Image (cartoon, helix red, strand yellow):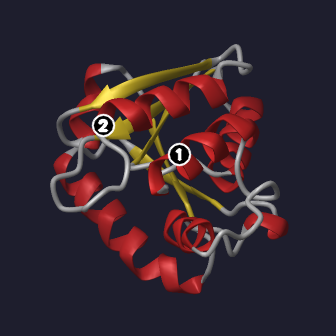
Amino acid sequence: MKIKAIYPGTFDPITFGHEDLVKRACEIFESVIVAVAFNTQKNTLFNFNERFDMCSKVLEKYNNVEVIKLDKLSVDHAKDLDAKVMLRGLRAVSDFEYEVQLSNLNRTMNPKIESLFLSPDEKYSFISSSVIKDIANHKGDLKKFLDEYVEKKLIDKIK
């Protein structure tokens, strides 16, 4: 059975933690759709097109990944794209409650979409986009957390 998965997120910016989940998902699923969300609820550093561009550039090395712009509910996009699985990352127990609530909401909206939780490699388990932006604001070393292209974009953005 060929299964397609969708991995929605804000990716502000995309980190090695995000990429780690995508890489591992590529080994499980025939096709992985990374859906960059236009999220009016979040005050993002990078605009929608910048986030889409960074994700596209970082993930272009994966043959079975497609990066799309998510301009509606992720569960609706999953249905439209015939994705059966919604991927979500869990870094710590603190992420779990929110992600389970979101999973239950998505299941209520479309019972045919399953949520799958993946935890990143432990070396990325503490990385969040917020922490990365804080490190950048304090001129810390970002090489262990971000692709070179994204690192340059972030440094240019906060200058």
Residue farthest to the top?
A: 63
Say which residue appears at 72% left-offset and 42% top-offset: 147
Within 10 Å of the Cα at label 2, are there few (<14), some (14-19), or many (20+) other Cα atoms?
Answer: some
Tell me residue 29's x, y (percent): 65, 29
- Which numbered disc flags the more N-terminal residue, 1 or 2? 2
Say which residue appears at 65% left-offset and 47% top-offset: 151
At label 1, the amino acid type is: Asp
Mark 2 highlights which residue? 48
Seen from the viewer's position, the closer of residues 101 and 9 is 9
| 132 on left or right of 8 | right
Tell me residue 16's x, y (percent): 71, 51
Total marks shown come to: 2
At label 2, the amino acid type is: Phe
Q: Quadrant of the N terminus?
A: top right
| 17 on left or right of 131 | right
Mark 1 highlights which residue? 156
Seen from the viewer's position, the closer of residues 154 and 22 is 154
Say which residue appears at 74% left-offset and 19% top-offset: 61
| 30 on left or right of 67 | right
- Residue 89 position by quadrant: bottom right
When the figure is inspected, residue 111 is found, relative to residue 63, above or below; the finding is below
When the figure is inspected, residue 159 is found, relative to residue 3, above or below; the finding is below
